[in-house]
Amino acid sequence: MDVVLAFAAALVSLRLAADLIRRWRDRRTPELLAWGASLAAFAAASGALAWGAAAGWDDRAFRAYYLFGGLLTAPLLGAGSLLRARVSLAAPVALLFAGLAVGVAVAVPIDPAVTGTDIPDAASHLAFFPARALAVVGNVTGTVAAVAVALTGLRRRPLGNCLIIGGVVAAAVGSAVAGLGAGGGAIFTIIAASLLYAGFVSRR
C-alpha cells in the first residue's frame, strides 16, 4: 500500500505541475514557473518514496528524496510567492540556491550507507553542514516567504491564499509524520499539492 500511495502522490503532483507549466507558457508569469517547479519537486520526492518503499532504501533513493523533498520544494514554493509579490530578486536567488542544492545532494558523503525499508532519518546519515544546514535555511526561508505573502494578500485573494496556507501546513504535517512510513507521507503530499495548486490558480 505504501508503494501505491507514494506512486499516486507522484502522479498527482506531476499532473498538477504540468498544468502550471502549461499556464506559464500561455501567460509567461514567472511565479507559475516557480510553483510548477515546486510541485515537480514534490512529484520527484514522492517518486523516491515509491522507489524506497518498493525496492528498499539505498544511497541513490535517499539522495533523490533529500534533494527534491528536503532541499528544493519549499524554497521554490517561497520563490514563486515572492515573484507573485513582484520581488524580482527571488528568481536569481532561487536559481543559485537550486544549483547549490543539486551540488550538495550529489556530492555530500552519506555515512553510514542507507539501507532498510523505513524512510531514512537525515540526521543519521548526513553531517549538519552543509546538507542539513542548507535544508534548514531553504525550508525555513521558503515556508516563511510563502506564508507571509499569502497572509499579506489575504484580503485581496482570501480563498486562494487560505488554500496556499493550508497546503503549506499539510506539507509540514506530512514531514512531521514521516515515521508513519511512505504511505503516510504520500497522503499528506497529495493533500498539500492539491491545496497549493488550487491556491495558485484561484482568482478569489
Image (tube, rainbow, N blue to C red):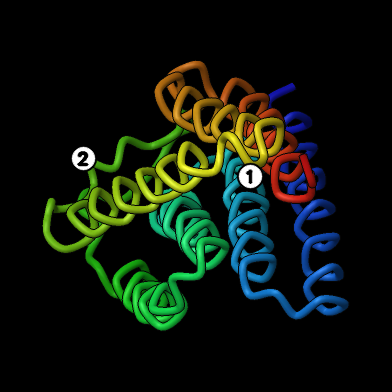
| Quarter in which the N terminus is drawn | top right
Instruction: Specify few, some or many for label 1: CA neighbours under 10 Å numbering under 14, 14-19, or 20 or more.
Output: many
Q: Residue drawn at (75%, 58%), measured in percent from left and top? A: 17
Residue 148: percent from left, percent from top: 40, 43
Q: Do we see residue 54 in this rendering?
A: no
| Mark 1, secondary structure of its residue | helix
| Quarter in which the C terminus is drawn | top right
Residue 85: percent from left, percent from top: 51, 61
What amino acid type should be assigned to the residue bearing mark 1? Ser
Q: Residue drawn at (50%, 61%), measured in percent from left and top? A: 76
What residue is pinned by disc 2?
123
Q: Nearer the viewer, residue 73 or 127?
A: 73
Q: Is residue 5 above or below residue 71?
A: above
Q: Do we see residue 172 in this rendering?
A: yes
Q: Residue drawn at (78%, 61%), measured in percent from left and top? A: 20
In which image quadrant can residue 184 be found? top right
Instruction: Specify few, some or many for label 2: CA neighbours under 10 Å numbering under 14, 14-19, or 20 or more.
Output: few
What residue is pinned by disc 1?
46
Q: Is residue 34 left or right of 78 when viewed as pictured?
A: right
Residue 94: percent from left, percent from top: 42, 73
